[in-house]
Image (cartoon, rainbow, N blue to C red):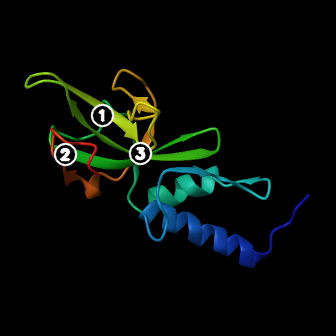
Amino acid sequence: MTHLSNDNENEITESLKDLAAGRGVKRSRHDLVVDGRDYTDEFIQILRETGYTPVTVANAPVEPGERIPAFYIEDSTAYFGWIFYEKFTGRKLRKLWGSVIRNRKGDWAIQISPKKDITVYADIHKKTEVDLDRPTDW
């Protein structure tokens, strides 16, 4: 069994804080297991302490032309993405959480629709405007 020193624990905690804030790290897909220890609970606590709220896509307070940064956590992995509306035509919009990770077609590799009862951690205070015609220009 690997035992981490307090210095290593502090370094990991600081790295998780940087990930939540988007400081010095590209937010995309992040494994939350380090040296055999799962830091999922610690990361969720950091998200909550830094303004992220657990919410479903359906309940996220976002309107067309806006986006909210949010993490989806599954199997000790944190995926960064956005809750926003995707525009198909002048009248047809779809609300979703889409990962910044793309698939081979260039679409969001992970998508969560409002119909799914899945919790994401969203920072509603960091809501920003986005061009409905070009939501992928992030």
Sequence order check, earlier mark of 2 and 1: 1
- In the picture of the structure, the residue carrying the numbered disc 1 is 59
Q: CA distance from mark 3 to mark 1?
A: 21 Å
Q: Residue at x 64, y 52 (%)?
A: 32
Nearer the observer, 36 or 136: 136
Which of the two marks, 3 or 1, is nearer to us in this view? 3
Q: Amino acid at mark 1?
A: Asn
Q: Is residue 21 above or below residue 89?
A: below
In the picture, the disc for residue 100 is: 3
* Residue 122 % position (x, y): 37, 48
Q: CA distance from mark 2 to mark 1?
A: 14 Å
Q: CA distance from mark 2 to mark 3?
A: 16 Å
Q: Residue at x 55, y 47 (%)?
A: 78
Label 2's element? strand
- Residue 7 lies in quadrant: bottom right
Q: Residues within 10 Å of mark 3 (few under 14, many from 20)?
A: many
* Residue 92 % position (x, y): 15, 22
Q: Residue at x 41, y 45 (%)?
A: 100
* Residue 110 % position (x, y): 46, 33
- In the picture of the structure, the residue carrying the numbered disc 2 is 66
Q: Amino acid at mark 2?
A: Glu
Label 1's element? loop
Which of the two marks, 2 or 3, is nearer to us in this view? 3
